[in-house]
Image: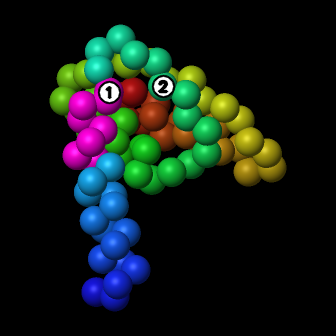
Amino acid sequence: MNNLALTSSKSISNISKYSKTLIRDGITILVHGNSSVVKNVLINSARRGIKFNIILTESMPDNQGKNLQHYFEQNHI
């Protein structure tokens, strides 16, 4: 694994670890853009039984907000 990939992997792991203390029942999360890290954090939080709300912004021309809405709906969030 090259240095960039290793650093990226460690960063994703750290973000996932620290997010466990930030996402709690009843919070509202504003999401702008389509980040695989953010999607994974939110999916894992929901799988742990945490209940939260998401507000998605729309960005053009690629409809990231709409695409994320479908993604979260498919994953029952």
Please tell me whether residue 9 belongs to the stretch shown in magenta: no
Which of these two is toward me, 9 or 48?
A: 9
The residue lying toward the viewer, choosing from 74 and 32, is 32
Which of the 4 image quarters holds residue 53?
A: top left
Determine the secondary structure under disc 2: strand
The answer to whether residue 64 is left or right of residue 34 is: right
Q: Residue at x 32, y 27 (%)?
A: 23
Q: Amino acid at mark 2?
A: Ile
Where residue 23 is drawn, which disc sits there? 1
* Residue at figure coordinates x 39%, y 27% from the top left: 77
- Residue contact between numbered discs 2 and 1, judged by CB atoms under 8 Å: yes
Q: CA distance from mark 2 to mark 1?
A: 9 Å
Location of the N terminus by quadrant is bottom left
Q: Residue furthest left?
A: 48
Q: Main secondary structure of the magenta part?
A: helix
Count all numbered tags in the image, as a single digit. 2
Density class for disc 1 (Cα within 10 Å; few <14, some 14-19, many ≥20) is: some
Whole-percent x, y for residue 20 in the image: 24, 35
- Relative to 27, is 58 above or below? below
Tag of residue 29: 2
Q: Looking at the picture, which amino acid does disc 1 mark?
A: Ile
Question: What residue range appears in magenta?
Answer: 16-23
Q: Is residue 19 magenta?
A: yes
Q: Point out residue 60 in the picture as x, y percentages from the top left corner.
A: 79, 45
Which colour assignment does the render follow? rainbow
Residue 70 bears which disc, if any?
Answer: none
